[in-house]
Image: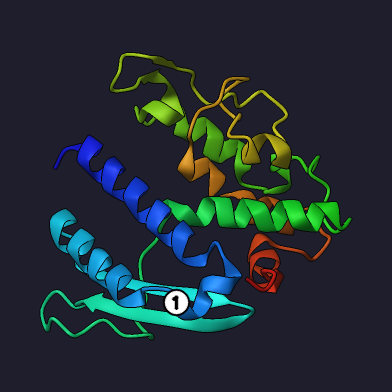
Amino acid sequence: MKIGFVARRLASLAAFAAAMVGAPAAAEDADYDSFGAFLEEFRRETGTPAISAVIVRDGGIAWETYLGTYDDEGELPTRAETTYKIASVTKPIAASAILAEAAAGGIDLAIPMTSDQGWTDLCEFFVTTGIPFMAGGKDRHGNAIAPMACSKPSTLRDMLDMRVNGDAFVYNPIAFARIDRAISGAGDGICARSCATGSRTLPA
């Protein structure tokens, strides 16, 4: 499937959703059925197995729908309890929670990654793996990727900025996964998991 097609459909989806929630006065007149039909069309065209969608107004659920199936073998209907694998979407969620905790004075972003006792040995192992975002190399566009800078005194701030491969931005998911250990190793009893689970979003 062409990326351009998906991007256009996502843009249409975002515009449609924005129109649905943009005007409070139009809440009772919102055409939820049309929006649901649009989502189902999007799901089928993109080959998406399952979609869960909720529109929230004034802190309450104004509309919800669950489309498709969520089990590869049983093809069970998608429902409110259906969970999704969101992969690397957890990274900005964790980073936002940590930054919120830092703003509240609960975490120092200058925590060194070496607070994780295994960080140095792991870093030195990483650069021998041949994995581009670990050992350096080139991306699929031919751009140079710097190897992890094990001699650099990387901090939590560097990790959140994805700058542990020198000073340039390099997406390094395996190194990012060590954030929790570094925070816990700093000895303040706060970890990335507790920050994420303790954070709360504001009402919609």
Q: Position of residue 36 (x, y in %)?
A: 29, 72
Disc 1: which residue? 29
* Quadrant that contains the N terminus: top left
Q: How is the image coloured?
A: rainbow
Residue 51 appears anywhere in the view: no
**Quarter residue 123 falls in:** top right
Marks counted in the figure total: 1
Front-most of residues 19 and 96: 19
> In the visual, does 170 lie left or right of 153?
left
- Indicate left or right for 134 with 176 as reference: left
Q: Residue at x 46, y 54 (%)?
A: 89
Residue at 75% over, 40% down: 112
194 lies above or below 2: below
Question: Secondary structure beneath disc 1?
Answer: helix
Residue 186 appears at what percent x and percent y? 79, 53
- Type of amino acid under label 1: Asp
Q: Locate residue 141: give its quadrant.
A: top left
Question: Badge 1: how crowded within 10 Å, few (<14), some, or many (20+)?
Answer: few
Is 190 on the left-hand or right-hand side of 133? Answer: right
Is any atom of residue 203 visible in this view? yes
Q: Position of residue 48 (x, y in %)?
A: 20, 62
Q: Residue furthest right?
A: 105
Residue closer to the observer: 132 or 77:
77
Question: Which sits in the foreground, 17 or 117?
Answer: 17
In the picture shown, does residue 177 fall above or below 24?
above
**Looking at the picture, does residue 152 appear above or below residue 52?**
above
Q: Position of residue 109 (x, y in %)?
A: 79, 44
